[in-house]
Every structure is written in structure tokens, then in C-alpha cells.
Amino acid sequence: MQVRRVDVGGYQLSAHVRDGVGVPVVFVSGLGESHGAWQPVLDALPDSVRAITYDRAGIGDSDPYPPPQRAAVAYRQAAGDLRNLLHSLDVTAPWLLVGHSYGGCIIRSLADDYPADVAGVVLVDPSVAELSLPDDLEQYFGEDDGDGTRYEGKSEHYCQIDNRIGAAQLRAENLPVVPSVVLTRARNTWNEPMPAVVDDYWYTEHEALVDKLDAWHIVAATAGHRIHEDEPALVACAIAAVGEAVAGGSSQLEGDAIEALGGCLQRVPTA
């Protein structure tokens, strides 16, 4: 893959670009994670797939945000950075966007603001809009520092993610109905034992997102939050199906094939 550094508005982001054919597949990592998190999925995809991975500001070889911008970065800022990056790389829209965890929030923000730029979506155990659980569940998981922020980037120049402003956008979003897959972790796969109500909330949020996108829904049999590392072939299969649908083919995800890859097909698109 070619390594490129491009200016996106006074700071440079690092991107890795693999030449190929078909719709460009753009990977968006989870909170604080570099482009390298997607290597197992890239290895599972055909070499002919045009793929772009990158590091957000302050991660990997990318520049940090200038100090004034580090105080509160909403999802829309990160989505704008990604869009500017792709335009600077001459990667023509529309794109097939693949996001894990917080990366799913960035994709949703971009799709809400620029629906014509999105050809398809694959969300890999995406975070809920707030990046945390409701107040009555915070005792079990996901506390923030009390002012609605999360953090990412190197310690000397980390930025604050304003998940409250970002969540307000996503709760009112108007997503394009494009070929989409949502992959959900298996139950009881948190880092620590959690009551069933936590999984219930996570699954309810994912099911609502699946309905909004009219997406295929795949639930992992055993994989946890990091499905792209635990079952990369399952994620690659989802990407291939969306890519085929984007290209105008009659793509179908078959239950038996998904089961063989470590998943269970819960829902298919209605259209």
C-alpha cells in the first residue's frame, strides 16, 4: 500500500492507499486506534479491492489537531477530515465506508451530511450514538469524565471527542438507504461480566440502526467487540456483499455461509 500524507485544513493526516478496481473501500478505525487495526480484514479481501485506511489527527503518523481544535471535536469534524482526506487523495465518491466502534459514528455523521458520497456501509459492532451507556447503566460500563467527552490521540496532544454534540446529530440523522451490513458482537463478550440488560440495550440500539438503514444484520457467534480481528473473513464477506450490491449485482448473504464464517444472519433488507 502507498503511504500518503495530505493536508486537510492546516494539519496532515497519514493514509495508506491500495490500488484496485471497483468502488473505493474506506476503513475508519475505533476510538484511538490506528489504520493497522484493519490489516486482518485487508488480508482477507482480494488484492483487487481498492482500499484506503488512515489515521485520525493525533494518531499514528498523522499530525495532531492544532491546540484550539483539541478542546471538543464532534463527530462532524472527524467526518469532515475524512472527506477532505479522500478528496485530497483524488478518491472519487461515492465510497463504501467500513467503520468499527466510534468509526461507525464518524461514518454515520458523514452519511448524514453528505449522503451522495456514500455508496454502501459496513458497521462493525458500532458504538451507540453517545459512546456510552445511559445513566442507569453507567454503573456497569462506560463512564465519562462528567462533561460529555472521550479522548483519543497521543497523551501529549490528545483531543477531546464531544460525544454529546455528536450524539445529538446522530439521534436526528437522516441516513441514505444504501446497501448496508451491521455486524454485532456476541452476547456476554464484554471485558468484564455484565448483566443481561447491558447486552439488551446494545442489541436494541443495533436493531434500530439496522431498521434505519434497511440493512443486513449479522450477529457474531463468539466474537466480541473486535469482530474485525476475531473473525476478519466474516467482515470481508460483508464488505464483498455490499460491494457487489453497489455494483448492481444481486448480492445475497447466505445464512449457511455466514454461519461457517462465525456469524448468524439475523435480518435481510426488505427492499
Image: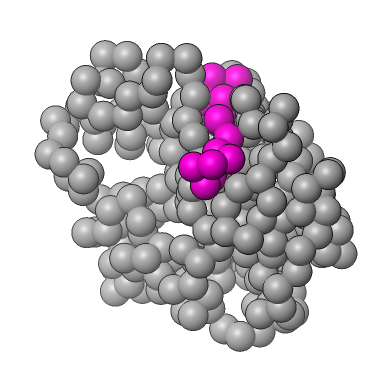
205 relative position to 8: left or right: left
211 relative position to 228: left or right: right
89 relative position to 41: left or right: right
Q: Residue at point 80% right, 59% down?
A: 6
Place of residue 20 in the rendered image (x, y in percent of width and height, measured from the top left): 72, 81
Q: Residue at point 48% right, 19% down?
A: 148
Tell me if residue 269 can be seen.
Answer: no
Rendered position, 191 above or below 72 = below
> In the image shown, does 132 or 250 lie closer to the viewer?
132
Q: Quadrant of the N terminus?
A: bottom right
Q: Residue furthest front?
A: 156
Place of residue 101 in the rendered image (x, y in percent of width and height, measured from the top left): 45, 45
Quadrant in the rendering for residue 88: bottom right
> In the image shown, does 4 or 47 lie closer to the viewer?
4
Quadrant in the rendering for residue 69: top right
Q: Residue furthest bottom?
A: 47
Magenta run includes residue 165: yes
Tally the marks: 0
Rendered position, 65 above or below 24 = above
Q: Which residues are magenta?
A: 153-166
118 relative position to 44: left or right: right
Quadrant in the rendering for residue 24: bottom right
Tell me if residue 138 can be seen.
Answer: yes
Magenta run includes residue 126: no
Place of residue 47 in the rendered image (x, y in percent of width and height, measured from the top left): 61, 85
Rendered position, 222 above or below 240 = above
Q: Residue at point 36% right, 59% down?
A: 227
Q: Residue at point 33% right, 34% down?
A: 202
